[in-house]
Image: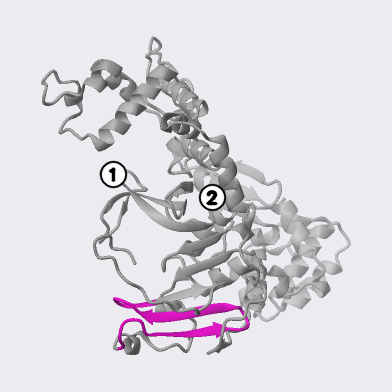
Amino acid sequence: MYNTPLLQQPTSPNQYLDQIQSKQSDEIVGFRGASLLGRKGLSRVKSKICKMEQMDIDSFSHVPVSSFYGRKSFSRLQDAADCIETYEGGEVDVIILPPEPDSLTDEEEFDDENIDDNRVPVDVPGSVEVDFGSDIEEDLNRDSENWNESDEETLANIQRLISTNSKKVCSWKLCEADYKVLKNSVGNGSDERLDDMKRDLNYNPKEIFEKLFSNDVFQLIRDQTILYAQQKNRHDFSVTIDEIKNFIGILLLSGYHKLPQQKMYWSLDEDLGVEIVSKCMSRNRFLEIKKFLHFADNTKIDKKDKMYKLRSLMVLLNKQFRQWGIFHKYLSVDEAMIKYFGHHSSKQFMRGKPVRFGFKDWMLCSSTGYCYAFETYCGKNLENKSESLGLGANVVLSFTEHLENPQDHIIFFDNFFTTLDLVQTLKGKGIRATGTIRDNRQKKCPVESSKIMNKKERGSFDYRFDENNEILLVKWKDNSVCSIATNYDHVEPCNNCVWDIKRSVC
C-alpha cells in the first residue's frame, strides 16, 4: 500500500487536485503516500479540497491521511465499542492491529487464582481501528450544488420551529371571554358511564376490591415470588393465591392498626396481639412469604427503568383502574408522596410537605378521589415529549392520552403544572382545563400586579382575555393573591362565599 511513489509536492490545494485528476491510474495517491482506490477516492479528495480552499498550504499539508477515508484509531477496545454503538450509519470494518515491536506482548492479564475457561483478555495487545468508509463515501458523493447547511437541520429543530411559529402572539384585552373552539357545554358521557358502572357493580366492598386487585394481579405476585425463591435455591418453596391474598390483607390491616413491632401482631398478650392476624396466617409463614415476595424477574432487568421491579404490577393496576372507562366529569392531575426511608435512586425529598421522604407519584384522579392512572417519578425524562413545555405540562399531556372522550371531562391542576402553552395545547385537543398559574408564567399579561392586588380587600379581582389563543387569566385576592388560567370558563357570575369554619369549606 505504501510502495506507490509520492506525487510532486503541490503548492496549493487546487494544484493538488489537478495533479490527481491528470493521473491515469485507478489508484490515486494521497499525502504521505497513502493510496485511495477508485473514483470514490477522488470524490473524497474533492470534498476535502472544497472544505480547505480557504486554508493555506502549510495547514493543508499537515492533514492526516486517515481523515480522507473516515477511519478512527483507538488504544482500548472499549473505546472502539462505544464509538460503534453511537454510530447511526450502516456497517463498519473493525481492524485489530498488532502492538509496537518493543511492547510487552507476552504478558497476559489474567489472575492466577481465577481459572475460568470462559475468561478472555480485558483488552487487545495493540490498537483498534474502526473504518466507516462505505457510509462516508456516500456522504461525500452528495451533489454539492443541491446541498446546503440547512439540510443538516435535525427533525427536532424543525418540529420546534414549526411549534414556535404556530403559537399566536397573545392579545390581552379587558373584555368578556368569547370562546369559539370550546364554546359548547361539557358532554354527559361520563355521567352515563357512571350510571352503567353503578348498575353493574352491585357488590360488597370485598368484591369491588377483587375487581381492582383481580386474579391476574395475585397470579403475577405468586409466579414471580416462586421464581425468585427458586433463583435463591429454595426449590421446595411454594405459595398459593389464597396465601398471597391473606398476606396482602395483613399488610392492609397493619396500615391502620399500627403496632411498634411486626411480630407483636402474633403476640399472646391480650392487650397486644391481633387475633384475626394469628388466625389468618402463622408468623413464620408470613415472614417466609415476605422474604421471597417479588413482582418481576431479576434476570430480565431493564437498567433504564428505575421502577422495573414494580413495573409489571403498576401496568396491571393502571389497566384495572380504568376497566370501566373514565366515569367522572371533573378530573385532577397532582402529585402524591409515598413514605419511604430506605435506599432507592428514585426516592425524593420534598421540603415543607407532610411526607418529606419517599416516592413521588403523578396521579390522575377524580374529584371524589378515585385514581384512574398513576406513574412514579424517576427523574426528568423528555423522551417522545415536548421539551419546550416542561416537566409538569408533559405529565398532564401524558395523562390526557387516557381520555377516550375529551369533551366529557374538565381537568384541574396546580401552578406546578400550569403554563399558558399547556392550556392552549389542551384547547387544541378539545380538553377543558383550569389551573392556578405563577406570575412568571403569565407572558406579560397586563393584570394588576400581585403587590398592588395584595393591598386590596378580600374578593377584589382583575382579569384579561387573550383573544388570539382564547385563554382567560383571572387574578383575585383571597387569603393571598391567586391567579388562574382557563380555556373554557368565565368571570361572571360572581357569588359571595361563606366559610364554614368547622368543616374548612365554603
What amino acid is at disc 1? Tyr
Q: Viewer-proximal residue, 222 or 369?
A: 369
Question: Is the image coloured rainbow, by chain, by secondary structure, or in one colour?
Answer: one colour
Q: Viewer-proximal residue, 428 or 296?
A: 428
| Residue 302 locus on image (x, y percent) | 49, 39
Against 472, residue 99 (above or below) is above
Please identify, in this view, whether the residue under mark 1 or under mark 2 is nearer the observer: 1
| Residue 231 locus on image (x, y percent) | 42, 20
**Could you tell whether 311 is left or right of 359 in the image?**
right
Residue drawn where x is 62% and y is 70% of the image: 160
| Residue 285 locus on image (x, y percent) | 29, 16
Residue drawn where x is 62% and y is 76% of the image: 164
Quadrant location of residue 506?
bottom left
> Is the residue marked by circle 2 packed among few (<14), some (14-19), or many (20+) residues within 10 Å?
some
Which structural element holds mark 2? strand
- Is 473 contained in the magenta span? yes
Quadrant location of residue 68?
bottom right
**Could you tell whether 278 is left or right of 193 in the image?**
left
What amino acid is at disc 2? Phe
| Residue 450 locus on image (x, y percent) | 35, 84
The residue carrying mark 2 is 74
Nearest to N terminus: mark 1 or mark 2: 2
Q: Which mark is residue 340?
A: 1
Against 332, residue 101 (above or below) is above
User: Is residue 52 visible to us here?
Assistant: yes
Q: How many marks?
A: 2
Which structural element holds mark 1? loop
User: Is residue 112 visible to us here?
Assistant: no
Q: Which mark is residue 146?
A: none
Q: Viewer-proximal residue, 208 or 422?
A: 208
**Could you tell whether 188 is left or right of 460 in the image?**
right
The residue range painted magenta reads: 456-482
